[in-house]
Amino acid sequence: MLADNITGLQHLGLPVTNIDQSKAFYKRLGFSETMVRELPQGDDVVRVVMLELNGFVLELYQLIGDDLAEIRKRQHGHIDHFALNVRDIQATWVAVQAAGLKILEDAPVFLPFWENGVHYFNILGPDGEKIEFNSIVPAP
């Protein structure tokens, strides 16, 4: 059952137009930096910062090109997704497929986040909101 595999909120993803400015803002609120990554995208990079405050993880990321331009045009609704922790990403994938939900990726995606990486995929909610299922790879 899908609910048995979800262990809680993983993080909230927030696209930003200036990651250094946003990081400084959230640090003033008491958040501390727990991870920084740069993901190559052609000749540029997508910058990602994870911040944490009292168990709440906020993912700030700065996109590039047309995606960044679209974020700059938004007036409201900058929150892009929320992520749920799952025990088993493959079991979650199967359960979501069986439920007939709209999956945005062709397969779970690996990212070099945290110490050993994560696997994730997204679905769309009824109003187009993205819900991410995220499984942090445990230490060997």
Image (cartoon, grey):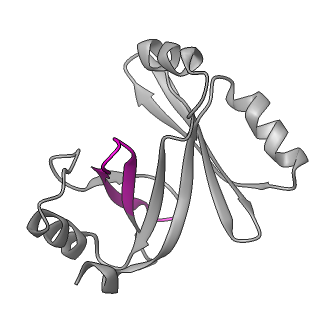
Residue 137 quadrant: bottom left
**Residue 60 screen position, x and y as percent:** 62, 41
Question: In this rendering, would 62 be left or right of 104?
Answer: right
Magenta span: 115-133
Residue 26 quadrant: top right
Whether residue 28 is situated above or below residue 57 in the rendered picture = above
Whether residue 37 is situated above or below residue 70 in the rendered picture = below
For image coordinates 32% across by 81% down, the residue present is 3
For image coordinates 58% across by 16% down, the residue present is 72
For image coordinates 9% across by 69% down, the residue present is 98
Whether residue 35 is situated above or below residue 135 in the rendered picture = above
**Residue 97 screen position, x and y as percent:** 12, 63
* In front of the other: 124 or 12: 124
Question: In this rendering, would 19 be left or right of 85?
Answer: right
Whether residue 35 is situated above or below residue 138 in the rendered picture = above
For image coordinates 17% across by 72% down, the residue present is 95
* In front of the other: 37 or 88: 88
